[in-house]
Image (cartoon, helix red, strand yellow):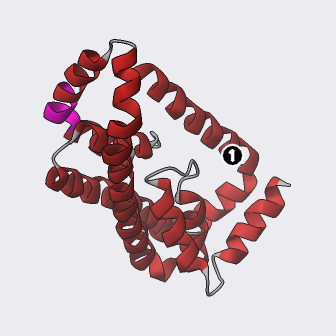
Amino acid sequence: MLRKLYDWTMSLARTRHAERALGGVSFIESSFFPIPPDTILIPMVLAERRRWLRYALICTIASVLGALLGYAIGAWLFEAVGRPILAFYGKEDAFDQMANWYNEWGAWGILFGAVTPFPYKVLTIFSGATGFNLAIFIVVSIIGRGLRFFLVAWLLYRIGEPIRLFIERHLGLLFTAFVVLLIGGFVAVRYMF
C-alpha cells in the first residue's frame, strides 16, 4: 500500500494540478493540517528537477500565507474561547507570563518551528494568541519557511536520481522515521506548552 501511495504521489507530481496541490497543502499545513508539504514537494522536485526553485517558492509563499491564517485563528479564537477557560481555572496569569516570555523570545521559536519538522501550526496559532509582533512574525516565517523549502528542493535538485533510488529502496524505513518525527513533534508540543 505504501508503494502505491508513493507511486500515486510521484504521478501527481507530473500532473497539471500538482502546483495547486502543493500550494494548498503548504497553506493549510501552517495553520491546522497535520501533513507537511514535503510529501508533495519531494516527488515534484524529483519528477521535474529543473523546476526546484519554482516549487520551493510556491511552498514558501503559500506556507507564510497559511501562517497568517494560523495567527488569525490564535488572535480571534483565543479571546473568545481560550481566555474564559483559563479564567475559570484561575490560570489567566500563567498564560500572561508565558505570553510575555514568548513575545520577547518567540522569534527563535518561530524560526525553529519554520525550519524543522516541529508542528509549525502550533507556533502560528500561539503567536496570534499572544499578540506577537506581526511584522516580526512575517519576516521570521519567510526566512524560516524559505530556508526549509529552498534547502530541501535544492538538495533534491543537486542529488536527484540517487536520492530517488534511496527513497524507493528504503521507503518503509523513511515513512516510519517520518511518522515518528511527526508524532514526536506533537508530543513535544504537549509538554512544552
Eyeballing the image, is 112 above or below 72?
above
Q: Is residue 19 magenta?
A: no
Decide if residue 85 is in sight here: yes
Q: Is residue 102 magenta?
A: yes
What secondary structure is marked by label 1?
helix
Decide if residue 193 is in sight here: no
- Prevailing secondary structure of the magenta residues: helix
Eyeballing the image, is 63 above or below 83?
below
Residue 4 found in image quarter: bottom right
140 lies left or right of 74:
left
Image quadrant occupied by the C terminus:
top left
Image quadrant occupied by the N terminus:
bottom right
Residue 146 found in image quarter: bottom left
Location of residue 19 in the rendering, given as x and y in whole percent from the top left corner = 53, 78
Location of residue 24 in the rendering, given as x and y in whole percent from the top left corner = 52, 69
Which residue in the rendered view is the most extreme toward the top? 90
Residue at horizontal 53%, vertical 53%? 36
Residue at horizontal 22%, vertical 31%? 102
140 lies left or right of 155:
left
Instruction: Give neighbour class at mark 1: few <14, some 14-19, many 20+ (Cα, 10 Å).
Output: few
| Pointer 1 residue | 175
Check disc 1 and give the amino acid type.
Phe
Residue at horizontal 70%, vertical 68%? 9
The residue range painted magenta reads 101-106
Location of residue 44 in the rendering, given as x and y in whole percent from the top left corner = 57, 73
Which residue in the rendered view is the most extreme toward the bottom? 16
Q: Nearer the viewer, residue 47 or 34?
A: 34
Eyeballing the image, is 155 above or below 129?
below
